[in-house]
Image (tube, rainbow, N blue to C red):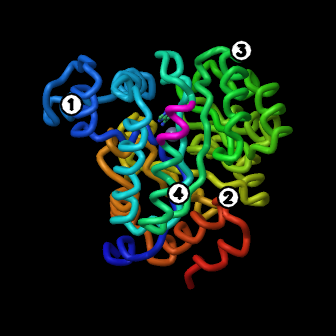
Amino acid sequence: MKTLIEQLPKAELHIHIEGSLEPELMLKLAQRNHIKLPFNSVEEAQEAYQFNNLQSFLDIYYQGANVLCREEDFYDLTWNYLQKAKEQNICHTEIFFDPQTHTNRGVPFAAIINGISEALKAGQEQLGISSYLILCFLRDLSVESAFETLENAIKYGDKIKAIGLDSAEKNNPPSKFKAVFDQGRSEGFLTVAHAGEEASSDYIWQAINLLKVSRIDHGVRSIDDPSLVEYLAETQIPLTVCPLSNVKLKVFNSLEQHNLKVLLDQGLCITINSDDPAYFGGYLNENFMAISQALNLTESDLKKMINNSFKASFLDPKQKEKFYIQ
Ligand code: ADE
Ligand code: ZN
């Protein structure tokens, strides 16, 4: 099973680039940019990575992102992830970035997008990894701030495939961003949204009906609404599920209690992803390995979810065909 997971080409569809910031690079960038961190070593950082819920993680994640200041920092961050992706046989990746986390500290949007995009270009040329960028709005910030960010997205529209929604989910429903997403779609962006990670299945319905998403990020709370499960099976709107993240953030108490196999068996288009691998103890292959063992997944389950990773991607149908396995 391990060899199968390691060797098969895969796509990753739910990875926050800021969540791939390993403590080593964080410490290096803190020094380079004269930023004070609450830890002085990799070990101290890892000890601090204990979370009770999504918010307790986000507090540490945004603090870590403070070391990202200049274009080269965003390049280094993205390049490090791509090298890891290469080791794991990820041949296509759709990467989230959170511009407001940086523009709110005075980092120019251009530095963020150019640093990430240059690394993605090098990833394609030197590592053969194709990629798309997804700009996420922070849902706990205002709608006005999201509109300002959308203006920037439109300026760099050739570098951005889709818009999404992340950060603190509870009390920040998709409906809050309907007008932003309406404009985003009219500008040609595809849409996705984190929904049903911590908040209820109603947020998943809102993401589908109001934001017209192509995929739901997480979506595990769909299980609470049988009519939603039926709808997701029928429409094949994919869920980008992140098993290690879900346990670290106590969405499930253990991997054994994860509902991904139940949803897969009901015919949903389930994909496996890493979310914030530097914080949750594993990249894509570690997520596949851990969940396979915990839920006794079969070779056929694994192949199904690997094929789903391409099926659910924003690649065009001809490109997808090349990756499907038997
Ligand atoms: N930002 C980074 N990781 C996230 C997650 N798991 N949920 C919501 N926002 C996030
Ligand atoms: Zn996420």
Instruction: Give the image location of residue 190, x and y in percent.
Output: 74, 46
Q: Amino acid at mark 4?
A: Thr
Instruction: Give the image location of residue 83, x and y in percent.
Output: 35, 58
Q: Does the CB distance between marks 2 and 3 fall below 8 Å?
A: no
Q: Is residue 190 visible?
A: yes
In the figure, residue 5 lies in which quadrant?
bottom left
Image quadrant containing the N terminus: bottom left
Q: Residues within 10 Å of mark 2 (few under 14, many from 20)?
A: many
Residue at 68 percent of width and 44 percent of height: 162
- Left or right placement of residue 220 versus residue 146 in this view: left
**Which residues, given as a range, are shown in magenta?**
110-115
* Residue on which disc 1 sits: 45
Real-space Cα distance between discs 2 and 1? 35 Å
Residue at 51 percent of width and 74 percent of height: 303
Relative to 245, say whether 144 is above or below.
above
Relative to 50, say whether 14 is above or below.
below
Q: Amino acid at mark 2?
A: Phe
Q: Does the CB distance between marks 4 and 1 fall below 8 Å?
A: no
* Residue on which disc 4 sits: 93
Judged from the image, the secondary structure of the residue bearing numbered disc 4 is strand
Label drawn at residue 314: 2
Image quadrant containing the C terminus: bottom right
* Residue on which disc 3 sits: 144
Q: Amino acid at mark 1?
A: Ala
- Left or right placement of residue 138 versus residue 181 in this view: left
Real-space Cα distance between discs 2 and 3? 28 Å
Q: Is mark 4 within 8 Å of ligand 2?
A: no
